[in-house]
Amino acid sequence: MLREELKKELDRLNDEQLKKIADFIAFIEFQSRQSAPSSPFWQRATSVERAKDFRQWISQLPKYDLSLPDEAFSRDTIYVDDELPA
């Protein structure tokens, strides 16, 4: 109903008024694009794009020669003797 009424109103407008309406519509469309929540990169990117982004992120991390000692990777060193369940 509203659509038909608006069409009739638009037919009655002159070119200058129609230009203002077109500008207003463009503004509304621009606002809706700005406020629309964009999907996160990981959802819209391809697997190749995600891998490239990950490698780029990794390359920016600080580079240290420090590492954990081998004991840190051993399951035996996770628990202290007095903390073992009875």
Image (cartoon, rainbow, N blue to C red):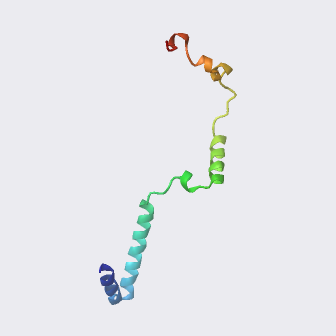
Instruction: Name the residue at 56% across, 51% down.
Output: 42
* Residue 85 falls left or right of residue 8: right
Q: Disc count in the image?
A: 0
Residue 60 image position (x, y, % from top left): 64, 41
* Residue 69 falls left or right of residue 78: right
Is 39 drawn above or below residue 13 in the view shown?
A: above
Residue 31 image position (x, y, % from top left): 41, 65
- Residue 62: image quadrant is top right
Q: Residue furthest top?
A: 82
Which one is nearer the viewer's eye here, 16 or 80? Answer: 80
* Residue 79 falls left or right of residue 58: left
- Residue 24: image quadrant is bottom left
* Residue 49 falls left or right of residue 37: right
Is 71 drawn above or below residue 17 in the view shown?
A: above
> Looking at the figure, which quarter contains the N terminus?
bottom left
Which one is nearer the viewer's eye here, 62 or 84? Answer: 84
Instruction: Name the residue at 41% across, 60% down.
Output: 35
Q: Residue furthest front?
A: 86
- Residue 14: image quadrant is bottom left
Which one is nearer the viewer's eye here, 38 or 1? Answer: 1
Instruction: Name the residue at 58% across, 19% down.
Output: 78
Is 81 drawn above or below residue 24 in the view shown?
A: above
Residue 11 image position (x, y, % from top left): 35, 89
Which one is nearer the viewer's eye here, 46 or 15? Answer: 46
Residue 79 image position (x, y, % from top left): 56, 16
